[in-house]
Image: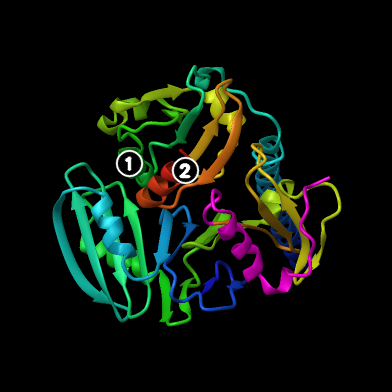
């Protein structure tokens, strides 16, 4: 009889452990879902204004959203920083590291975590177009440096 | 072109009718790995010439080496600036990705490529992560451009349901409900298709060219009967 009780206790502990693991997995899923809601695109469809990107240039501003951990961003910045007529050009990022990129020196870098969060960047690099008042008008996912050149050339 | 992506057993397959194979195309998707392998890559696929462009965009190469893998030629190009490009050139299509670490060695590249099953044909390139390595796509699943025609974005519904309007769509197309959207400037035109698992965004390759926008919509034979009008 004692052996049966011992087996039941061991079994109960195993079930308890399984429940703990299941609960941890559930919590992780809930956190992912919450993060998904927080970073969703609903706000992106609303009006986003960036005073730092307002300009007297009547053509507005192109902003390239980049992340220092993104290798494609480094290459895109090289194409973006080429001198050109048309809208002003700025790089937007959430962290300081990008200001150290030599390629970024030719255009201004706006480091603004709050702005970054309000833009709801789905992926980087992303090309954003702001009107002279600094209101976001258009966003385009950038595939490559040549694609970026096409986007910049086509709309300027 | 048929672009297929098989992240975790499900397949997103986009079939575009017509003589589209003559057009250059490019596609990209994102893969993240398990905590053990720490992978987080943006992969690019495309028509012939894509890899050469990708390498030339990096600037002056400092080192390069090559080997054969899965019926294609692999080339690893490193720059002094700490960037590297790994390219795979198959008989019909190409694949490449960038890395920041220029110290990457050939063994690491081979290990990375072995995580992917590549199936190259005239119909397109299927990239399928091998089972058991914890690879999965990120929230933005895939983005494809067909030059002079359209771009197509496929987003996981779980994370991008908010992209879909709250009002009724213009109609029901194959696979889901269809909306037309204009961007904030009022000039852009996009179609949104909401399916049970994904949000598909379709837009013209060149916003400034109305004929391209019309062609993009017209090519979607299944959607031709859907009236196009501004959102309510």
Judging depth in this view, the residue of B186 and B173 nearest the camera is B186
Q: Is residue B148 above or below residue B162?
A: below
Q: How has the structure been colored for display?
A: rainbow
Q: Is the C terminus of chain A in the top left, top right, bottom left or bottom right quadrant?
A: top left
Q: Are marks 1 and 2 in contact (CB under 8 Å)?
A: no
Q: Is residue B152 visible?
A: no
Lower position in the chain sequence, tag 1 or tag 2: 1
**Is B214 colored magenta in this rendering?**
yes
Numbered circles on residues, count:
2
**Label 1: chain?**
A
Q: Is residue A44 above or below residue B117?
A: above
Determine which residue is flagged by label 2. A124
Report whether B85 appears left or right of B44. left
Task: Spot the residue most to the left.
Answer: B62
Instruction: State which region is magenta.
Output: B205-232
Q: Is the N terminus of chain A in the top left, top right, bottom left or bottom right quadrant?
A: bottom right
Q: Is residue A94 above or below residue A146?
A: above
**Is B141 colored magenta in this rendering?**
no
Judging depth in this view, the residue of A92 and A80 nearest the camera is A80
Residue under the point 60% across and 57% down: B213
Determine which residue is flagged by label 1. A79
Q: Quadrant of residue A79?
A: top left
- Label 1 or label 2, whichever lies nearer to me, is 1
Q: Position of residue B167 (x, y in %)?
A: 85, 48
Report whether A10 appears left or right of B51. right
Distance from the alpha carbon under mark 1 to that under mark 2: 15 Å
Q: Is residue A77 visible?
A: yes
Q: Are marks 1 and 2 on the same chain?
A: yes
Q: Position of residue B179 (x, y in %)?
A: 76, 55
Residue under the point 47% across and 32% down: A62
């Amino acid at each position: 009889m004692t052996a049966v009780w011992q087996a039941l206790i061991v079994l109960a502990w195993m079930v308890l452990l399984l429940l703990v693991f299941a609960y941890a997995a559930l919590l992780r899923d809930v956190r992912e879902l919450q993060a998904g809601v927080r970073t969703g695109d609903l706000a992106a469809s609303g009006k986003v204004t960036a005073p730092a990107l307002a300009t007297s240039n009547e053509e507005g501003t192109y902003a390239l959203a980049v992340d220092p951990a993104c290798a494609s961003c480094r290459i895109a910045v090289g194409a973006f920083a080429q001198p050109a007529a048309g809208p002003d050009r700025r790089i937007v990022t959430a962290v300081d590291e990008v200001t150290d990129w030599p390629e970024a020196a030719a255009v201004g870098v706006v480091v603004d975590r709050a702005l970054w969060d309000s833009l709801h960047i789905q992926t980087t690099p992303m090309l954003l177009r702001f009107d002279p008042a600094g209101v976001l008008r258009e966003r385009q996912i950038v595939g490559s440096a040549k694609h970026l050149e096409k986007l910049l050339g086509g709309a300027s | 072109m048929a672009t297929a992506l098989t992240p975790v057993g499900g397949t997103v397959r986009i079939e575009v009718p017509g003589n589209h194979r003559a057009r250059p195309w490019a596609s990209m998707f994102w893969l993240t790995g398990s905590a053990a392998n720490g992978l987080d890559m943006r992969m690019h696929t495309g028509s012939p010439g894509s890899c050469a462009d990708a390498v030339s965009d990096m600037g002056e190469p400092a080192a390069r080496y090559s080997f054969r893998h899965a019926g294609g030629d692999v080339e690893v190009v490193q720059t002094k600036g700490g960037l590297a490009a790994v390219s795979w050139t198959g008989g019909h299509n190409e694949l490449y990705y960038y890395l920041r670490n220029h110290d990457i060695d050939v063994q690491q590249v081979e290990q990375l490529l072995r995580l992917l099953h590549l199936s190259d044909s005239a119909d397109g390139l299927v990239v399928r992560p091998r089972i058991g390595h914890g690879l999965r796509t990120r929230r933005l699943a895939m983005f494809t451009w067909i030059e002079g025609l359209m771009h197509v974005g496929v987003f996981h519904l779980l994370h991008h349901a908010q992209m879909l309007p709250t009002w009724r769509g213009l109609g029901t197309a194959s696979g889901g409900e269809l909306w037309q959207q204009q961007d904030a400037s009022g000039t852009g035109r996009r179609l949104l298709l909401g399916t049970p698992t994904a949000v598909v965004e379709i837009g013209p390759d060149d916003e400034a060219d109305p004929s391209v926008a019309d062609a993009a919509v017209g090519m979607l034979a299944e959607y031709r009967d859907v009236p196009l009008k501004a959102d309510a």
